[in-house]
Amino acid sequence: MKKCIQLLVVTIIFSCTNNKTVFSQNTKAREIVSYLDSLDGFSGAVLIAKDDHVLLQKSYGFAHLGHKVKNNTDTKFSYASIGKSFTAVAIFQLIQAGKLSLDDPIGKFLPNYPNKVARDSITIRLLLIHRSGLADYFYSDKFLNTSKVKFRTIESLSDLYENEPLEFKPNEQFSYRNTNYIVLGRIIETVSKMPYEDYIKKHIFAKANMQNTGNFDIDHIIENEAENYTLSDVYPNQLQKTFFMSAVKGSSAGGGYTTINDLYKFALAFKNNKLLNAKYTDFMKKEPENGWYGYGMQFAGAKGSGIYGHSGGHFGVGAEWRIFDKQNYTVILLTNKDLDQGFLDARFFIEKTIAGSTPKLDIYFYTKKVINTCLDKGLDKAAILIKESKLELSEADLNAKGYEMIKRGLYKKAIDVFTLEILSFPKSYEAYDSLGEAYMMDGNLKKAIENYKKSLALNTENTNAKEKLKELIK
C-alpha cells in the first residue's frame, strides 16, 4: 500500500512538473497569460490546451462580489448560447440514427404548429443555420416584461412566437434567433420521447463525462456558481446582478452552466468523434461558403482558418469554446461580466496570438487604442491618431464604449467618444443620436437638441430622436 501511495505521489509530481515545463516552453501560452493578467477587472476562467494536453488553467476575479469569493478553475459559469452546440449535436445524433433528416419540415414533428407557412416550409436545416424567419421571442416585450419564472420549460415559451408573423420568408436571409433552437429542442423531445434535458444529460454530458454541466434553475442553489454582473442602469459606475434579465432556466437555446474543464471535455469529445461519427462531425465543422455561422457552429478568423466552436454572451456573460484545427489548440473562456469588460479583449488576443492577425482583429485593437487615447489623453490626441492612420475604426465598439461611459456617469468622456464616432462616421444617424443622449445626461440641453435634430435629418424614421426632441423642447 505504501509503495502505491508513493508511486501515485511521484506520478502527480511528474505530471505537474511536466505541465509546467510544457507551459514555460510555449511562448504563445505565456503571452496569453501575461495579457490576461494585465486586464483590469477581468473576471472568469481560461483553459488552453495544445495537442490535446492542457497547458494552463487559470481563474480571475470574483464569483461573488458581495462575499468576496474568488473564481476558481472549478467555478460554474453561465454559458449562454453555447447550449446551441449541444442542441445541434443532439439533432445530428438523431439524423445519424435515421430518426430525422435535415430537410424534414417542422410540421412533421409539430403537426399542431399554428402557422401553416412555418409548419410546411421551415426545415430542420433552416432552424440550425438561423434562416427560418421565426419571430425573436427573446427580445419581445411579452418576454422582457413578464416574470421569467413563467418560462421554466421549452414548451412554456411557445406562446411567445408561435402566433407571431414570420420576420421574413423561410430561407430568405440569415437572422440569429434563439427561437430556432427552442423549436429544435421541442423536436428533440418529440423524436426521442424524452425531455430535452434528459436527452442532453444521457447522450452528450454523460458521453463526454461532463459532471458539472446542466440547465440549472438560476433561482435555486447552484453549487460553486459564479454570479453574473453587468454595469448598472440604475446607479452610475456600479455593478448590477442579472437575475431578472435572463431566463430562469437553461434551454435548448442556451443559458445553462458549466466549468472550463467540462467544456474542454465536450470540445475533445466532439472533435475526436465521441459524440458523432466522423461523417457528421466533419459536416458540422465544415465552414460555410458565406457567413460565419454553420450548423450549430461558429467560424472565426480568415476564410479557411480552421477555427470553429461556439460563443455565448448576454448581460454579465461571455463564454466560448474554440478549436484551432490547424494549430491544434483548444481554448475555453468563461467570464461573468459583460462582453466588453474583458471577454472580447481576451478572445481576440488569444485568436491573434495563436492564429495570427486578420483585418477584423486589426480594426478591433486599433479602435481600442484610439478609445484609450481619447479617455487617457483627450479628444484632440485621439483625433490626431485617427488622422495619421489608414486603418478603419469599428463604429460598434466606439458606440459601446460611449454608452459604457454614460453608465459610469462619465458624461464628458462619453461626449468625447461619440464625437470621435461622428468624426469617423459623419453619415451615422446613430452616432448623432448617441451624442445627443450624452449631452442630455450632462445637462447641456441645447447641444442635445442640436444633435438629435442632426440624427433625425439623417434618418427621418428615428423614433428615439423624435421622442427625445418632444421631451427636450417641452
Image (tube, rainbow, N blue to C red):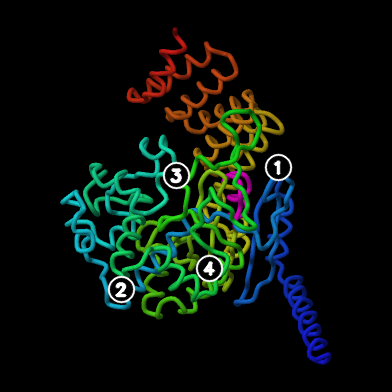
Which element is circle 4 on? strand
**Most foreground residue, 318 or 49:** 318
The answer to whether marks 1 and 2 mark residues whose Cβ atoms lie closer than 8 Å is no
Query: Could you give the CA–CA distance between mark 1 and mark 2, rounded to whole angstroms?
Result: 47 Å
Where residue 458 sits, quadrant-wise, is top left
Where residue 320 sits, quadrant-wise, is bottom right
Query: Could you give the CA–CA distance between mark 1 and mark 4, rounded to whole angstroms?
Result: 35 Å
User: Which residue is at 30% across, 62% downward?
Assistant: 187
The quarter in which the N terminus is drawn is bottom right
Where residue 452 sits, quadrant-wise, is top left
Residue 259 percent location from the top left of the image: 60, 62
Up the image or down, 280 lies above or below 158; here it is below
| Crowd band around label 3 with a 10 angstrom C-alpha radius: few (<14), some (14–19), many (20+) | some
* Residue that numbered label 2 is attached to: 95
* Residue that numbered label 4 is attached to: 323
Name the amino acid type tagged 3: Val
| Crowd band around label 4 with a 10 angstrom C-alpha radius: few (<14), some (14–19), many (20+) | many
| Crowd band around label 1 with a 10 angstrom C-alpha radius: few (<14), some (14–19), many (20+) | few
Q: Which residues are magenta?
A: 334-348
Query: Could you give the CA–CA distance between mark 4 and mark 3, rounded to whole angstroms?
Result: 35 Å
User: Which residue is at 38% across, 21% downward?
Assistant: 456
First in residue order: circle 1 vs circle 4: 1
